């Protein structure tokens, strides 16, 4: 029964992607949904893309070992979404997209700084999203393999193929519609499992009495680590392709900000559910392997709960994996292919190239994902590698003096240092964010202060597109008002004629 339900779910998602492919006939429709996403679609897109199945399973695993402090990776995302809206980052990406046709984060960096900086940003994004994507097929295989009786390695390959197919066919519009389905399944199914798990062990009071006090302390293992998790994840959202992509695809600044706010509210509560399930598993079966805490706990209650847990994680994986592939395809098509290899590339050529890259990255990511060890720590490390790029962008939008040289060198050194620190295993138990910020900000501020120009050329371009976009918005509002007024007068005239 469970395999039948899961198989039907996968077929439905693939069919949505195939249907969406018939609506994505050019690169604008495929990559940025014709810039027509409303607040609800922005919310669903962000919620689904950010809450991956790998992180959900990893959250339960980590909470089994340390408790509630495992939620900080997701709470850091909430901080990032709200900062994105508060700092009006969406205004910049939308104005750049509307007035200059931009569709990717590196294109925005090229516009604000130069080609070198955009290439550095492209490299950072491809590495980060490839790391996060590589974790998804393995997580999906861990669920579907036993369910369908297929070897885990083979199932990971099949899972990677499914996500690649969904990404190739769906485009941004398809992702948004699919994520409405995924988000509903994720929330309802995981809530039911959480409620049953806490009740199964006797309630929160029993959990508090059975677990060490540190399990209910959000500041674990220490302040510096928690701040690095939350702040590193948060500021990385300022230049994330997920948030920028939602801004590029939104139909208004209001849609961006409302979507960000409500997505943040949904994400705020979600990580508490796998965390509580992991902690309940620790109470119920303390000798259980932490990696199976989520499913072990659910299956120990009933087959129904086990099935619901599987559905929730599959929905989370399928909402994230294809979106990550689409992001990488967008970056490579816009910034490597059109930006470097073939500047005169047509819409059709970009569309074909992006879909080929999605397929290639899907295959390579699935292979490297089989080598992964710690899911949650890999995701945290990936976000901290990207974090300094968010700092550079935010500072440049508020400090007119930031030069392209300062942006380039601080981004290269800060990003490279974070990556080296992460892959070296966090020497001295220090998170990658801290050396990256310390060295990167020193370079950024030092080189900028040496500049003799009070306002950089990039900041002037930024202010120009804002003025153009504001003028466009005023003109569109004037036309809409005129059209509505004409419609009202026409309607009134018809009513008067009918009455006469």
Image (spheres, grey):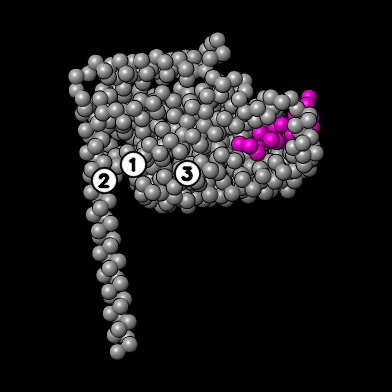
Q: Which of 183 and 19 is in front in this view?
A: 183
* Residue 287 is a magenta residue: yes
Q: Name the residue under label 3.
A: 261
The image shows residue 121, relative to residue 491, as above or below, that is: above
Between disc 3 and disc 2, the foreground one is: 3
The boundaries of the magenta stretch are 271-295
Q: In this view, does 112 lie to the left or right of 54?
A: left
Q: Residue at x 54, y 19 (%)?
A: 224
- Residue name at image x 24 percent, y 15 percent: 450
Dot 2 corresponds to which residue? 469
Toward which corner of the image does residue 31 lie, by quadrant?
top left
Residue 446 lies in quadrant: top left
Per the model, the C-alpha gap separating discs 3 and 2 is 23 Å
Looking at this rendering, what residue extends furthest in the bottom direction? 500
Quadrant assignment for the C terminus:
bottom left
Majority secondary structure of magenta residues: helix
Mark 1 surroundings: few (<14), some (14-19) or many (≥20) residues within 10 A: many
Residue drawn at the location 38% of the way across and 49% of the way down: 254
Q: Is mark 2 on a helix, strand or loop?
A: helix
The picture places residue 455, in percent across and down from the top left corner, at 21, 27
Residue 214, above or below 304: above
Residue under label 1, please give it.
Answer: 91
Q: Does the magenta stretch include residue 94?
A: no
- Residue 131's spot in the image, x, y percent? 51, 26
Residue 209 locus on image (x, y percent): 78, 30
In three-dimensional space, the C-alpha distance between marks 2 and 1, rounded to whole angstroms, equals 9 Å
Q: What element carries label 1?
A: helix
Q: Can you name the residue that lies furthest to the left here?
A: 452
In this rendered view, identify the residue nearer to me: 6 or 212: 212
Residue shown at 61% from the left, 25% from the top: 219
Residue 284 seen in this snapshot: yes
Please state the horizontal and vertical placement of residue 286, each as a whole percent of the image.
78, 26
């Amino acid at each position: 029964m469970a395999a039948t339900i899961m198989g039907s779910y996968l077929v439905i998602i693939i069919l949505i992607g195939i249907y969406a492919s018939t609506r994505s006939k050019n690169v604008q429709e495929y990559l940025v949904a014709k810039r027509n996403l409303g607040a609800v679609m922005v919310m669903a897109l962000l919620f689904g893309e950010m809450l991956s199945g790998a992180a959900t399973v990893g959250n339960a695993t980590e909470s089994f070992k340390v408790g509630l402090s495992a939620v900080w990776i997701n709470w850091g995302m909430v901080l990032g979404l709200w900062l994105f809206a508060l700092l009006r980052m969406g205004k910049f990406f939308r104005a750049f997209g509307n007035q200059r046709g931009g569709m990717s984060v590196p294109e925005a960096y090229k516009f604000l700084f130069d080609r070198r900086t955009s290439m550095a940003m492209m490299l950072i994004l491809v590495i980060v999203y490839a790391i996060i994507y590589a974790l998804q097929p393995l997580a999906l295989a861990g669920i579907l393999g036993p369910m369908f009786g297929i070897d885990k390695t083979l199932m990971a390959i099949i899972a990677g193929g499914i996500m690649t197919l969904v990404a190739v066919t769906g485009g941004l519009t398809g992702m948004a519609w699919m994520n409405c389905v995924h988000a509903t399944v994720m929330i309802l199914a995981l809530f039911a499992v959480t409620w049953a798990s806490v009740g199964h062990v006797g309630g929160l009071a029993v959990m508090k009495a059975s677990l060490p006090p540190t399990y209910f302390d959000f500041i674990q293992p220490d302040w510096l680590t928690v701040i690095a998790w939350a702040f590193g994840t948060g500021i990385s959202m300022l230049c994330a392709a997920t948030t920028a992509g939602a801004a590029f695809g939104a139909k208004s600044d209001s849609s961006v900000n409302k979507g960000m706010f409500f997505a943040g509210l949904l994400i705020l509560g979600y990580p508490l559910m796998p965390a509580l399930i992991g902690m309940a598993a620790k109470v119920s079966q303390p000798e259980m392997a932490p990696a199976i805490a989520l499913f072990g706990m659910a299956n120990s209650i009933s087959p129904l709960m086990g099935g619901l847990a599987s559905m929730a994680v599959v929905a989370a994986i399928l909402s994230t994996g294809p979106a990550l592939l689409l992001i990488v395809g967008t970056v490579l098509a816009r910034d490597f292919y059109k930006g470097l290899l073939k500047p005169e590339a047509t819409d059709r050529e970009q569309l074909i190239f992006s879909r080929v890259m999605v397929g290639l990255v899907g295959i390579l990511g699935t292979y490297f994902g089989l080598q992964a060890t710690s899911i949650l720590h890999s995701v945290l490390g990936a976000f901290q590698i990207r974090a300094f790029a968010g700092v550079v962008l935010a500072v440049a939008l508020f400090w007119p003096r930031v030069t392209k040289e300062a942006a380039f060198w601080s981004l290269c050194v800060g990003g490279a240092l974070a990556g080296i620190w992460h892959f070296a295993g966090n020497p001295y138990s220090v998170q990658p964010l801290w050396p990256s910020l310390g060295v990167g900000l020193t370079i950024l501020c030092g080189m900028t202060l040496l500049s003799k120009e009070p306002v950089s050329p990039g900041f002037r371009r930024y202010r120009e597109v804002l003025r153009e976009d504001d003028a466009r918005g005023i003109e569109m509002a004037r036309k809409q008002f005129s059209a509505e007024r004409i419609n009202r007068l026409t309607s009134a005239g018809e009513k008067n004629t009918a009455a006469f």
